[in-house]
C-alpha cells in the first residue's frame, strides 16, 4: 500500500515516513501542494496524509483540486489547526478524516488503515483465493498456514492482483503502484517482477494462476476459476 504524505516540516515528515514504512506502507513524501498534485496525477495512492499549512498553496486547495479531478483517494488531514470551523471546513471540503497535531503515530496509522479498508469496501482485512490468503493490513501472504517471503514490490503486485481477481490489471497500473513518485523501472522490470512472484507462488503450491494478456497486462484467478473472497 502506498501513501502520499504532504508535510513541509522535515523532521515530522521523516518521523511519520519511518513509522509508516515500519507498518508496511510505501511512502512518497512531498513538502508543497503543487508537488502533491503532480504526484497524485501520476501515481496511484491508497491514502493521502495532508497538512493544511503548506508553503505554496493551502492544503484545502490541494484537497479541492483532487476532488475536482474526481480523485477519490482517502484523505486524512493532519494539522495544527484545531478549531471546530477548521475541522468542518476540512471535512466539508472532501477529507475523510481529520487529526490535530500533536498526535500519536499509532493512532494515525490505525486511522489510515480504517480509511483504506473503507475505500476497498470491506470490513475485513484478509482476501482469499483458494489456498492463498493476503492480509491487507498486516501485509502478510500465506499458502495455508505457511507465510511467503516476498519483497515489498512482490507484495504490492500480489495485493493489486488479488484485489482485482478475475479482472485485468494493466502494466501501467502496476508500474504506478510498485514504483515511487518520479521513479521508473527498466523496460522489462514488470515482467521480471511477475516472473519472481509466479515462481514463489509455484514453489509453495499456490492454487492460483497469474495470466499474461499480451500487450495489456495481467489477471489473477484460482486454478479452478474461483474468484477472491474477502
Image (spheres, rainbow, N blue to C red):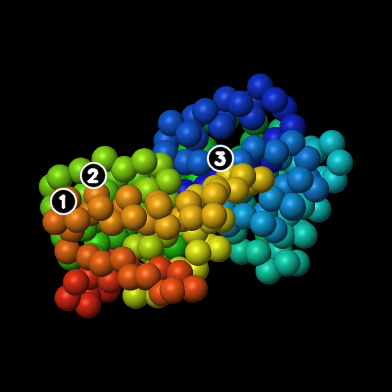
Pointer 2 and pointer 1: residues touching (CB < 8 Å)? yes
Name the front one of labels 2 and 1. 1
**How far apart are the two marked residues, 2 and 1, measured between alpha carbons?**
8 Å
**Image disc number at residue 158:** none
Q: Is residue 146 left or right of residue 170?
A: left
- Residue tagged by mark 1? 204
Name the front one of labels 1 and 3. 1
The earlier-in-sequence mark between 2 and 1 is 2
- Residue tagged by mark 3? 27
- Quarter of the image where one finds residue 92: bottom right
Rendering coords of residue 201 (x, y %): 23, 54
Pointer 1 and pointer 3: residues touching (CB < 8 Å)? no
The earlier-in-sequence mark between 1 and 3 is 3
Rendering coords of residue 168 (x, y %): 43, 73
Q: Nearer the viewer, residue 15 or 129?
A: 129
Rendering coords of residue 182 (x, y %): 66, 45
Q: Is residue 101 left or right of residue 2?
A: right
Q: Is residue 214 visible?
A: yes
Vertical order, 45 against 32 (above or below): below
**Image disc number at residue 148:** 2
Vertical order, 218 against 33 (above or below): below
Pointer 2 and pointer 3: residues touching (CB < 8 Å)? no
Crowdedness near tag 3: few (<14), some (14–19) or many (≥20) residues, C-alpha within 10 Å: many
Q: Nearer the viewer, residue 196 or 132?
A: 196
The earlier-in-sequence mark between 2 and 3 is 3
Q: Residue sitting at 67 percent across and 57 percent down?
A: 42
Vertical order, 206 against 153 (above or below): below
User: Residue furthest toward the right?
Assistant: 56
- Indicate the secondary structure of the residue bearing disc 2: loop
Amino acid at each position: 500500500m502506498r501513501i502520499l504524505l504532504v508535510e513541509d516540516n522535515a523532521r515530522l515528515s521523516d518521523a511519520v515516513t519511518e513509522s509508516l514504512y515500519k507498518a508496511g506502507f510505501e511512502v512518497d513524501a512531498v513538502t508543497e501542494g503543487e508537488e502533491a498534485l503532480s504526484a497524485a496525477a501520476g501515481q496511484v495512492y491508497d491514502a493521502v496524509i495532508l497538512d493544511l499549512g503548506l508553503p505554496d498553496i493551502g492544503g484545502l486547495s490541494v484537497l479541492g483540486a483532487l476532488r475536482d479531478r474526481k480523485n477519490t483517494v482517502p484523505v486524512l488531514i493532519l494539522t495544527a489547526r484545531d478549531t471546530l470551523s477548521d475541522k468542518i471546513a476540512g471535512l466539508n471540503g472532501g477529507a475523510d478524516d481529520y487529526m490535530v497535531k500533536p498526535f500519536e503515530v499509532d493512532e494515525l496509522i490505525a486511522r489510515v488503515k480504517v480509511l483504506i479498508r473503507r475505500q476497498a469496501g470491506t470490513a475485513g482485512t484478509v482476501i482469499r483465493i483458494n489456498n492463498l490468503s493476503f492480509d491487507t493490513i498486516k501485509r502478510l501472504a500465506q499458502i495455508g498456514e505457511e507465510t511467503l517471503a516476498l519483497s515489498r514490490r512482490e507484495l504490492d503486485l500480489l495485493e493489486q492482483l488479488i484485489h482485482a481477481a478475475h479482472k485485468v490489471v494493466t502494466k501501467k497500473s502496476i508500474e504506478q503502484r510498485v514504483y515511487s513518485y518520479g521513479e521508473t523501472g527498466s523496460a522489462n522490470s514488470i515482467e521480471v517482477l511477475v516472473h519472481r512472484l509466479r515462481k514463489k507462488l509455484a514453489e509453495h503450491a499456490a492454487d492460483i494462476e497469474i495470466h499474461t494478456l499480451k500487450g495489456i497486462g495481467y489477471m489473477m484467478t484460482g486454478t479452478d476459476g474461483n474468484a477472491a473472497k474477502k
